[in-house]
Amino acid sequence: MKSVPNFAALRAAVLLVVFIVSSALFVVNSQSKLQAPAYTLADVQKVYPDARSFALGKNNEIVVSNRKKAVIGYLLASTDFGISYTGYSGDVSVLVAFDQKRIITGVYVFKHNEDKAYINDVIFEGLLDRWNKKALTPEVSKQNIDAVSGATFSSNAIINTVRHTMAAYLKTEIPAPVSRNLLETANAESANAATKPVYENKTKKSIGPRAAIMPKPALVIGSYDSNGVPNILTAGWAGIANSNPLSVAVSIRPACKTHDNIMATRFFTINVPSTKYAAHMDYVGVVSGHNENKFETLGLTAVKGEFVNAPYVGEFPVVLECEVTHTINLGSHTQFIGKVIDTKVDAEIGRAHV
Ligand SMILES: Cc1cc2nc3c(=O)[nH]c(=O)nc-3n(C[C@H](O)[C@H](O)[C@H](O)COP(=O)(O)O)c2cc1C
């Protein structure tokens, strides 16, 4: 007897095949969308210029190959581990490069919204180099790295992202994040909260108006008189007054020779003495240029400013060259506001220290 084809069964079978194929395609498609890396070959080539391709290894490391398909190095991308820490303006993503022996060969920021100046500071201060040549181990992933002052949020975000990425790859304990402020750090270190405010009805006594701000600076102000004779004065009534334009404020009594000089030239320098020159700084603050040339008495070198018509003290390690923008008569003193035109530091001084 001729068998009658079972169309219903056939149809069901065809539909099942179509369903399986389309769902398989959907899974592949959605997975490939999920796995689209946040970095590109161009990012990888910034680390490995010879890179021509890369693929994810079994532990989520990026295996980088050259034109001949030979492996030339490895990378960890924070984004592959879903790790992100926020700097000033958003998440920071890093690449950690390492070789076959698991020695770290570089750390790179490949995606961020930070101000470029902060990231430049971080690079300039060598933060990213601090992991170089270290083994990719749990100990190194926990290692303390100091934040870069002035770019603290950006550098802390980088430090946390790098350490957490390494820990995720090594499947080890995730290091406690570097804190964003001293209060958090203190509270993390001590449960008994040494930072807890203690007021306890403390009574205050009034002592009248006093210049009770500590510490006070002891800066040396350089200026020329109208004959080009260099002079220096010690100033405690001085400090940073504005960020943009970077400006300083110095208050000087009209009786001082420096007062006449700055009124005439509209320029001055601020010289920060090292402890070696504490006695010189003191002398400059008790003897007037009306009576003697203090540079000559003290054997200090008056160097003509590069950008301003004022001398600086060659022996002192930090110098600010300033142009007067405002003159304010406050009573006993005239306050000179000076725009900082340039800062000079002895070559061996790192930028982190000024
Ligand atoms: C530690 C210290 C801080 C001083 N701070 C100031 C100051 O802020 N403003 C000022 O007019 N004089 C200040 N003086 C006094 C002047 O430096 C001092 O009168 C000096 O001899 C003036 O020099 P000149 O006449 O050559 O300009 C200070 C002195 C010392 C020792």
Image (cartoon, rainbow, N blue to C red):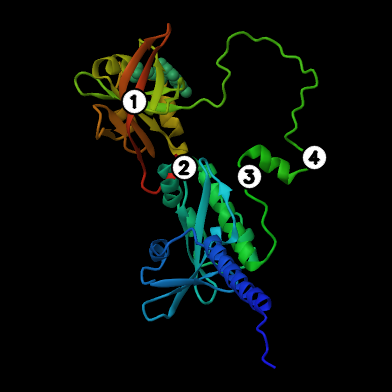
- The residue wearing badge 4 is 192
To which residue does mark 2 refer?
353
Q: Is residue 64 above or below residue 113?
A: below
Q: Horizontally, is 321 left or right of 39 in the view?
A: left
User: How packed is label 3: few (under 14 Cα within 10 Å), some, or many (20 or more)?
Assistant: some
Give whichever of discs 3 and 2 has the lower sequence position: 3
Label 2 amino acid?
His
Q: Position of residue 305 (x, y in %)?
A: 26, 32
Residue 26 appears left or right of 311: right
Specify whether 245 is left or right of 108.
left
Identity of the residue drawn at 41% across and 25% down: 283
Instruction: Name the mark nearer the viewer: 2 or 4.
Output: 4
Element carrying mark 3: loop
- Spatial CA distance of label 3 from label 2 is 21 Å
Disc sitting over residue 28 in the figure? none
Mark 2 or 4 closer to N-term?
Answer: 4
Q: Are marks 4 and 1 in contact (CB under 8 Å)?
A: no
Could you say whether the residue bearing mark 2 is in a helix, strand or loop?
Answer: helix
Quadrant location, the C terminus: top left
Which residue position holds label 3? 179
Instruction: Name the residue at the left extreme.
Output: 227
